[in-house]
């Protein structure tokens, strides 16, 4: 028998989060990745408070007695590290209102956990700020508790990491061409340490070009310049 709750919030994401919290109260230890959402209303903000209507969602999950473990949970191939990352990412995604199923790709060098679900933009955030923060938190928690050999953990959603890498590499090349053409340094927009590294690595072998990071966090940025400029 299914268990359903309705919740309201300022946004659909907030309504989903409140619904998940209520389901967790009613069925402790629920698998948040198997919750199904129906958006009843996306809400209206109104003008100066007039005509305001909250967003509403219905969240549904099979009761514990009837539910089957999701496919990813039934898999026996997960290492201890992968299982820990999977559970942690599902909980963090639920905290920002994302219904997430986690796909794990692990080798001897690294582990990538990709979130597949509704509203991936909520998990990614502006310029990847949210997903970068989640990745930092997951690494900090898992590295503190890991019993296995430590390895870097990459958190992804909807192929964001690859798309962003390609965008940054294209920006790096265009900036290098401009720096050589104009004979002067080009300053890029502020980026995270992870994104600055992508730019540095892409241009490290470009003839006549050097890169450096300047500024202070969170506004640290890359400078692309002709060698010696």
Image (cartoon, helix red, strand yellow):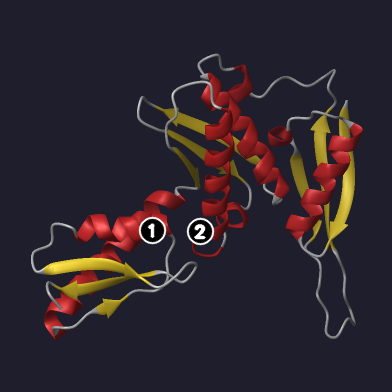
Relative horizontal placement of residue 89, taking residue 60 as reference (left or right): left
Can you tell which quarter of the image residue 137 is in? top right
Q: Is residue 153 above or below residue 48?
A: above
The residue to which callout 2 is attached is: 128
Q: Say which element carries label 2.
A: helix
Image quadrant occupied by the N terminus:
top right
- Is residue 57 shown above or below 81? below
Q: Position of residue 212 (x, y in %)?
A: 27, 67
CA distance for labels 2 and 1: 10 Å
In-front residue for pair 7/133: 133
The answer to whether residue 85 is above or below residue 42 is: above
Q: Which residue is mark 1?
A: 195
Q: Quadrant of the C terminus?
A: bottom left
Residue drawn where x is 18% and y is 67% of the image? 210
Q: Is residue 36 visible?
A: yes
Q: Mark 2 and mark 1 in contact? Answer it, CB < 8 Å.
A: yes
Residue at 39% across, 32% down: 110
Left or right: 12, with 22 as reference point: left
* Label whose residue precedes the other's in the sequence (2 or 1): 2
User: Of all residues shown, which one is farthest toward the left?
Assistant: 207
Query: Is 135 or 211 nearer to us in this picture?
Result: 211
Nearest the viewer among 112 and 184 is 184
Task: Assess disc 2: are there few (<14), some (14-19) or many (≥20) residues with their C-alpha within 10 Å of its C-alpha.
Answer: many
* Residue shown at 53% from the left, 47% from the top: 136
């Amino acid at each position: 028998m299914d268990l359903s709750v309705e919740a309201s919030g300022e946004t659909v994401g907030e309504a989903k989060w409140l619904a998940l919290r209520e389901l967790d109260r009613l069925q402790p230890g629920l698998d948040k990745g198997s919750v199904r959402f129906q958006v009843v209303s996306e809400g209206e903000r109104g003008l100066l408070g007039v005509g305001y209507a909250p967003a509403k969602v219905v969240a549904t999950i099979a009761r514990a007695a009837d539910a089957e473990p999701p496919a990813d949970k039934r898999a026996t191939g997960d290492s201890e590290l992968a299982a820990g990352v999977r559970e942690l990412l599902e909980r963090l995604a639920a905290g920002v209102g994302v219904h997430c199923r986690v796909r794990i790709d692990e080798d001897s060098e690294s582990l990538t956990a990709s979130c597949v679900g509704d509203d991936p933009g909520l998990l990614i955030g502006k310029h990847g700020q949210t997903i970068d923060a989640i990745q930092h938190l997951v690494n900090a928690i898992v590295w503190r508790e890991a019993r296995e050999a430590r390895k870097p953990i990459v958190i992804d959603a909807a192929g964001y990491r690859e798309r962003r890498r390609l965008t940054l590499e294209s920006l790096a090349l265009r900036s290098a061409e401009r720096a050589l053409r104009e004979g002067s340094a080009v300053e890029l927009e502020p980026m995270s340490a992870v994104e600055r590294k992508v730019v540095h690595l892409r241009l490290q072998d470009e003839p006549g070009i050097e890169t450096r990071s300047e500024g202070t966090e969170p506004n640290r940025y890359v400078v692309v310049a002709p060698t010696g400029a």
